[in-house]
Image (cartoon, grey):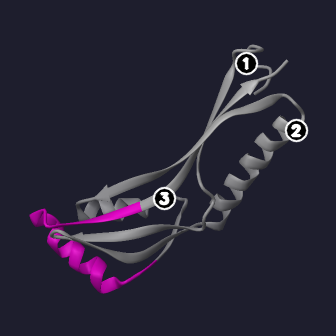
């Protein structure tokens, strides 16, 4: 990655979820939002995030890059149909849902009427690295 960027002006953008093992799951029923549980990540995905961060840290230590800016923000997914909610689980990095099943089922039952949604939140990190030398 170092060779592909020009010195002094080349930037590398890194965008990854924070390497927590889960994302929070909330349910909106009407005007009320309640915590339903957690959507756990596959262990290999958490390991991949750590490996990517270690690689970037090694590049900074070797003075190939310097971190210019870093921000953390919430990334929020809204599922307002049962099909979109089920499609979430087709992603290979999604693991086990540990949640109040009754609350999830209540939301799914009310989704066709637009009276409910499932909200999944995760923390993300965006960082910009500038090429040195």
**Residue 61 numbered tag:** 2
Q: Give the residue pinned by disc 1.
A: 5
Mark 1 falls on what kind of element? loop
Residue range of the region highlighted in magenta in the rendering = 98-120
Q: CA distance from mark 1 to mark 2?
A: 18 Å
Earlier-in-chain disc, 2 versus 3: 2
Quarter of the image where one finds residue 1:
top right
Instruction: For the C terminus, give its image quadrant.
Output: top right
Q: Is residue 85 left or right of residue 46?
A: left
Q: Tell whether position 108 is magenta.
A: yes
Quarter of the image where one finds residue 32:
bottom left
Q: Is residue 63 left or right of residue 103?
A: right
Label 1 Cα crowd, 10 Å radius (few <14 / some 14-19 / many 20+): some
**Residue 122 numbered tag:** 3
Count all numbered tags in the image, as a single digit. 3
Q: Position of residue 87 (x, y in %)?
A: 36, 59
Q: Tell whether position 99 is magenta.
A: yes
Q: Which of these two is toward me, 119 or 45?
A: 119
Earlier-in-chain disc, 1 versus 3: 1
Q: Residue at x 72, y 25 (%)?
A: 130
């Amino acid at each position: 990655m170092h060779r592909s960027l020009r010195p002094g002006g080349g930037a590398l953008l890194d965008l990854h979820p924070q390497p927590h093992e889960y994302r929070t799951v909330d349910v909106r029923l009407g005007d009320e939002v309640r915590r339903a549980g957690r959507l756990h990540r596959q262990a290999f995905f958490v390991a991949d995030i750590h490996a990517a961060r270690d690689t970037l840290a090694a590049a900074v230590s070797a003075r190939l890059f310097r971190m210019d800016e870093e921000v953390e923000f919430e990334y929020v997914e809204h599922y307002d149909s049962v099909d979109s909610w089920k499609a979430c689980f087709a992603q290979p990095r999604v693991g086990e849902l540990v949640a109040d099943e009754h609350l999830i089922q209540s939301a799914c039952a009310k989704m066709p009427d637009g009276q409910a949604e499932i909200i999944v939140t995760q923390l993300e990190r965006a960082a910009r690295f500038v090429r040195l030398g």
